[in-house]
Amino acid sequence: KAGVTQTPRYLIKTRGQQVTLSCSPISGHRSVSWYQQTPGQGLQFLFEYFSETQRNKGNFPGRFSGRQFSNSRSEMNVSTLELGDSALYLCASSLDGGLAKLFFGSGTQLSVL
Amino acid sequence: AQKVTQAQTEISVVEKEDVTLDCVYETRDTTYYLFWYKQPPSGELVFLIRRNSFDEQNEISGRYSWNFQKSTSSFNFTITASQVVDSAVYFCALSPWVSGGSNYKLTFGKGTLLTVNP
């Protein structure tokens, strides 16, 4: 059974640009959540999607958005990139959200120059 | 507001030593869940354990054991006879529980980097 797949693995952008990150959950998993990991702030919850609907949202500005498709694949978009957006973005999937076991991908390392 | 504190930023041990990773949490919720995750150099977080606030029994799984004490708001993790492969960053996390709908909103500690030397 394939794990959670995140693409791309590495990304370099410049300030002001926008970026889209992709996450393919484990087959059959309907919940996808996103986390940002930085050395200073650690791991922070961004948002969670279930059946194409955002159910939960963390404390991030509106520049961070996401969506989920009917096949449960999810994308995360960050517009007007800032230097502080440089981070490892992790995606996690679970069967139905709730407090089921989360399976994480290896993340997308975003560098904003 | 929830908070998870992992006071140990880095720990270095020699193989076969026992090591305990500390986790202290703060929450106003009466029902909540605690987790431990491991992050090896490859980046993905690996689930280790989930414990709910009503279950204070200690748990042992192979070389791993967890000590949950509600009275002190702690959920410590012990590795017995550590191995080099245990080297990773370990995260303690906390989530509230709300009936109905999504209840998955983990608050992570800053993590403890464990290095096990041969």
Image (cartoon, helix red, strand yellow):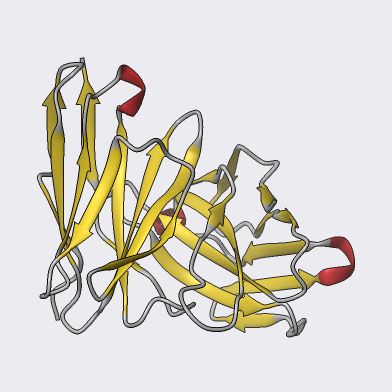
Query: Where does residue B65 sit, x and y in percent of width and height?
Result: 64, 74
Q: Quadrant of residue B35?
A: bottom right
Q: Residue at x 21, y 58 (%)?
A: A67
Picture residue at 46% right of the left edge, 74% below the top: B102
Residue B97 coordinates in the image, percent (x, y): 61, 75
- Would you place residue A44 above or below residue A19 in this image? below
Q: Nearer the viewer, residue A84 or B25?
A: A84
At x 55% / y 45%, what residue is drawn? B111
Where does residue B26 sit, x and y in percent of width and height? 76, 55
Q: Is residue B15 visible?
A: no
Q: Is residue B49 above or below residue A42?
A: below
Residue B91 visible to the viewer:
yes
Q: Is residue B79 above or below residue B117?
A: below
Quick one: B71 or A44, which is closer to the camera?
A: A44
Residue B76 pos. (x, y %): 70, 62
Residue B113 as seen in the image, left or right of residue A25 = right
Q: Is residue B18 left or right of residue A83?
A: right
Q: Is residue A23 left or right of residue B51?
A: left
Q: In the image shown, does B21 or A17 lie closer to the viewer?
A: A17
Farthest right residue? B71
Closer to the camera in the image, B27 or A49? A49
Q: What is the tally of numbered marks visible in this picture?
A: 0
Q: Is residue B78 above or below residue A38?
A: below
Left or right relative to A37: residue B12: right
